[in-house]
Amino acid sequence: MIKKLYKKMNDKVYKKSMAVIMAAALSMSLIACGTKKAELDTSSRTSNSTSVETEAETASGKAAQQTEAETGSGTETSQDSSDENTEAFNAEPVEAATTTGGAMETTDLFTDRDLTQEADLSSAESLTLKSGEDLTITAAGVYVITGTAEDSTIIVEAGDEDKVQLVLDGVSITNSDSPAIYVKSADKVFVTTTDSENSLTVSGTFTADGDTNTDAVIFSRDDLTLNGTGSLTIGSTDNGISGKDDLKITGGSITISCTDAAIEANDSIRIAGGNINITAANDGLHAENDEDDSLGYIYICGGTLNIQAADDGIHGTTIVQIDAGTIDVTAAEGIEGTWVQVNGGTISVTASDDGINAANKSSAYSATAEFNGGSVTIDMGQGDTDGVDSNGSLTITGGTISVNGQSAFDYDGQLTWDGGTVIVNGTEVTEISNQMMGPGGGTMGPGGMGGDGGFPGGDMNGGDWGDMNQGPGGRRER
């Protein structure tokens, strides 16, 4: 339908009609991000390339945490600029009811444009893929891309303040050694699927672009958001999607099969919606910044994730915070981070090592496994395995945790249990046994006090952590 509409875009009367249609469709957009604070209570390959340039959009630049209201852009200079930069045909985007009382301040982690699942096509440009040719975009704008091609890369090489939206409308790209989408430079890029099927595949060994190891089917040096109403299937001999800054997913159906990490980012992975299916020979989600161990966090507040991974299902260097969503993980280690906080959602983990592991991955945070809400089910394999393993503290204030295995909990620091339901091998328990028992270690029921398992003379004031570093935006005291 979009293709037929787009052919008539030069007709100004038809543009107005299409705007009404799209605005109505947006009313059925994804409702992103779940729990509220009350629930917490607390191309060098070919010289034959096509270059596309349009008028650069007005932008204020990249601000910390992307709190700016992101605007669209187009090619028609005769339109009034206020209309040009209006999001989604003046329609209100879906609201992200993110948590404000968790490990991180999350209210500004998604912009309106991130959460709008259909692009504003009123000033879009239509582009068609051709085999053996790269498609290079050098300026801000919205681009509707169609076609089937081999050995072709969509390259974004725009300005530092340019926002580029790639609208995939029935795209199929098969490459042997280069990414299907390569963001060299931009302020931010959106990859948006229409109600269509799209596939991106790299079948051979990736070739580096100078000093840049372009090792993913979608490779971005800058901020990247994936959304939409259609499907995107990614096949890779290395990584699936790689972002060197922040990477967000808010909609669409994404299926990834790869021999390394399925979705990786340096600074953060943020998921507010979508249906994500992953089969990975390494990690499913992996956030890590080699130069700054205070970055590399994962935030999930919606969507459905089905992850099968040979190593970690979900791995964040700093914080892994889950506020909502349905997550099913089968991996060697289910969920790992320095501070793992579950505030909501339905989580199922099948693991052969640790189900949920709060490990000392970051010097910026204390190892903590924290459960404030949601439903967590962990099924452990045989051997030296733990359902919940914390190299520091274990805190349970709400939700339901059900662990099946030989060792349900292993924590090195202090236990605080002030609420929630704990089930071990099918039986609800009133005491938590610590696999890491030592002088000062112990058990307790909800509201009681626990010692520091394995640490003589530990603080017996259950829940008194002192100051804890908070995520982006401040500190949190308990």
Image: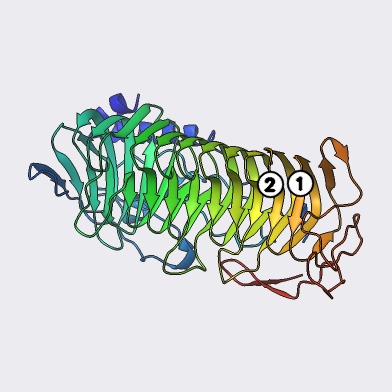
Considering the image in quadrants, where does the N terminus appear? top left
Say if residue 32 shows up in the picture.
Answer: no
- The amino acid type found where label 1 is placed reads Ser
Q: Residue furthest left?
A: 47
Q: Position of residue 64 (x, y in %)?
A: 46, 68
The total of numbered circles placed on residues is 2
Closer-to-camera residue (60/324): 324
Task: Pick the residue in front: 428 or 255.
Answer: 428
Look at mark 1 in the image and give the residue it sits on.
Answer: 407
Q: Residue at x 20, y 33 (%)?
A: 129
- Amino acid type of disc 2? Asp
Residue picked out by circle 2: 384
Q: Position of residue 34 (x, y in %)?
A: 65, 46
Label 1: few (<14), some (14–19) or many (≥20) C-alpha neighbours in 10 Å: many
Whichever of callouts 1 and 2 sits on the residue coming sooner in the sequence is: 2
Q: Residue at x 84, y 76 (%)?
A: 457
Q: Residue at x 87, y 71 (%)?
A: 460
What is the residue that sits farthest to the front in this orientation?
A: 383
Residue 452 in picture, x, y percent from top left: 81, 67
- Horizontally, residue 192 falls left or right of residue 351, namely left
Q: Nearer the viewer, residue 444 or 255?
A: 444
Element marked by disc 2 = loop
Q: Are marks 1 and 2 in contact (CB under 8 Å)?
A: yes
User: Residue 119 sits in which quadrant?
Assistant: top left
**404 over 51 or under it: above or below:** above
Q: Secondary structure at mark 1?
A: loop
Which dot, 1 or 2, sits closer to the camera? 2
* x and y, in percent, of residue 298 in the image: 55, 54
The quarter of the rendered structure image containing the C terminus is bottom right
* Circle 2 residues within 10 Å: few <14, some 14–19, many ≥20: few
